[in-house]
Image (spheres, helix red, strand yellow):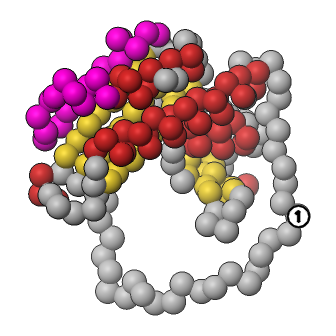
Amino acid sequence: MKINEIQIKFIEMEPTESLKKYVLDKIGKYDHLLQEATSMSVTLKQYISQRGVDNDFRVNMNVSVPNSTVRVEVEGKNMYAIINEASDILARRLNRYYDKKAYWEGKSPWKMLESENIDENLPEVGDQYIGYVPTITVRKKLDSMSPLEEAEAIERMELLGYDQFLFKNKKTGKISMIYRRKRGGYGLVEPPDSEI
């Protein structure tokens, strides 16, 4: 993919050539990582209702590569600074994708380390949520639920920039969720065998 094929979209802000050029210059530093990309979009958004607040700008970058998608989302108060940060994160995630390319292509089996020690002494959350009524603010349908290895699900989660990822486990056939633990490492949530 060539740099001039990147789609740049502005939401709730004036589209400017200087911002477009800045995005293309920053991503252009990593054009060697986009050679296998089939498409890329960059969305620059300003939250008009939050002007003057720390996170009043957001940059989303989405890159389609064979067998996966790499996604970056950064918020902040300076659009140029978050474009810098987002392009650096994108480069790290694309490097990670290429580092695992043999796994994505099925040439090498996905590897996973099992944790032998579970920390039972985690602090309790307490009742800070008394009276809280949760609200669903975003509803998303999954694009695909093709079976994945656990390590592959972790890589997809990392490439998308998520803290958790729902997938169908290739080993067990169960719908599972992998998540990043605050204290490091990853966790796996699966239903019991009786609920498959």
Q: Can you give x and y, in whole percent of width and height, for residue 103 in the image?
A: 75, 26
Q: Nearer the viewer, residue 184 or 87?
A: 87
Q: Nearer the viewer, residue 133 or 173?
A: 133
Q: Nearer the viewer, residue 172 or 41?
A: 41
Residue at position x 18%, y 51% in the image: 47
Q: Can you give x and y, in whole percent of width and height, for residue 119 in the image?
A: 77, 75
Q: Quadrant of residue 180?
A: bottom right
Residue 86 located left or right of residue 10: right
Q: Quadrant of residue 26?
A: top left
Q: Which residue is mark 1?
A: 116
**Residue 2 is one of the magenta-drawn residues:** yes
Residue 148 located left or right of residue 51: right
**Residue 182 is one of the magenta-drawn residues:** no
Q: Is residue 23 depicted above or below 51 in this figure?
A: above
Q: Can you give x and y, in whole percent of width and height, for residue 153 in the image?
A: 65, 40
Q: Can you give x and y, in whole percent of width and height, for residue 51 in the image?
A: 14, 58
Q: Nearer the viewer, residue 86 or 64?
A: 86
Residue at position x 36%, y 22% in the image: 24
Q: Is residue 141 depicted above or below 35 in this figure?
A: below
Residue 189 located left or right of residue 48: right
Which amino acid does the dot numbered 1 rest on?
A: Glu
All told, the count of numbered labels is 1
Residue at position x 88%, y 64% in the image: 116
Does any portion of residue 141 appear in the rendered image?
Answer: no
Crowding near the residue tagged with mark 1, few <14, some 14–19, many ≥20 C-alpha atoms within 10 Å: few
Q: In this view, which residue lies farthest toward the right? A: 116
Does any portion of residue 42 appear in the rendered image?
Answer: yes
Q: Is residue 153 depicted above or below 65 in this figure?
A: below
Give the magenta range.
Answer: 1-22
Q: Is residue 174 depicted above or below 191 in this figure?
A: above
Q: Secondary structure at mark 1?
A: loop
